[in-house]
Amino acid sequence: MRHTPVFALTDAAVVAQLIRDHPWATLVSNTSEGLVASHYPVLVEEGPDGSLTLLTHVGRPDERLHELGEHELLVVIQGPHGYISPGWYDEHPSVPTWNFVTAHLHGTPELLDPAENLRVLEQLVDHFEERMPEPQLMRGTLENSAYADRISAGTVGLRIPVERFTAKLKMSQNRTEGSLRRIVAGLEGEGPYASAELAQHVRRANPAVFGEAGQPADLTPPADPTKETSG
């Protein structure tokens, strides 16, 4: 991933939150047969020293296809992203760009024994089910528990200590205040590239303009980009 200092994301705690908010990960391995990619949900654990560890599982035979445990694995996390029109900039001429937040995490997976695999599966299920009105926990009933025990043989649990990561938060931090306000107005509008979630990330990434809470520092409503000229 291209390194641009103004967009670099180096805080492990922020990366951990990105993973919690967007846990659907892409796992990439450079195997003896070539590149292999799979997609699975992941959990993240933060150590007292700032270290990160990913927990997940794969369905068989992905552990063989990836040659898991034999080499480094790349885990890609993709957060909010979206198109940014040059019509939202003060600067002219300009070209369009794409705002995004993403993290690339590297580590060699540890394959878990069946008992640990079951614990990871339980953590995964419970983590996502607990926000449901009537959570269907893996050990919630004897029937659920017995079913999980039976089908867990078709999965392999993984613990991935993150040896290094590179992450990028590109939310127009290199743009002028006027451009930032127009970008947010465009994203919060009703056009084809509207994205309230992305607008909020632009606000939070530019506290000098929008305040620490992501609100306009002077509470002045952003200009409507459809009423601006390109001059």
Image (spheres, rainbow, N blue to C red):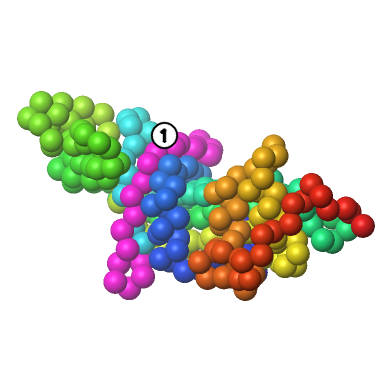
Question: In x, y percent, where is residue 112?
Answer: 23, 46
Tell me, yes or no, whether the highlighted magenta stretch contains residue 208: no
Q: Which of 51 and 34 is in front in this view?
A: 51
Residue 224 in the figure: left or right of residue 123: right
Residue most extreme to the right: 231
Residue at image location 53% in from the left, 38% down from the top: 34
Looking at the image, is 173 positioned above or below residue 227? Answer: below
Q: Is the magenta stretch mostly helix, strand or loop?
A: strand
Q: How crowded is mark 1: few (under 14 residues within 10 Å), some or many (20 or more)?
A: some
Q: Residue furthest left?
A: 142
Q: Does the magenta stretch include residue 40?
A: yes
Q: Which portion, as a residue range, is magenta?
A: 31-51
| Residue to which mark 1 is pinned | 65
Along the line of sight, the residue nearer the viewer: 65 or 167? 167
Is residue 97 shown to the viewer in this render? no
Image point 69% across, 37% down: which residue?
Answer: 192
Residue 190 shown left or right of residue 64 in the figure? right
Report the label total. Answer: 1
Is there any visible trace of residue 174 in the rendered image?
yes
* 85 lies left or right of 131: right
Q: Secondary structure under badge 1?
A: helix
Q: Residue 210, percent across and down?
A: 60, 67
The structure residue drawn at horizontal position 45% and vertical position 63%, both measured from the top left corner, is 14
Quarter of the picture containing the N terminus is bottom right
Q: Which of 186 and 223 is in front in this view?
A: 223
For the C terminus, the image quarter is bottom right
Instruction: Give the residue type that dot 1 points to.
Output: Leu
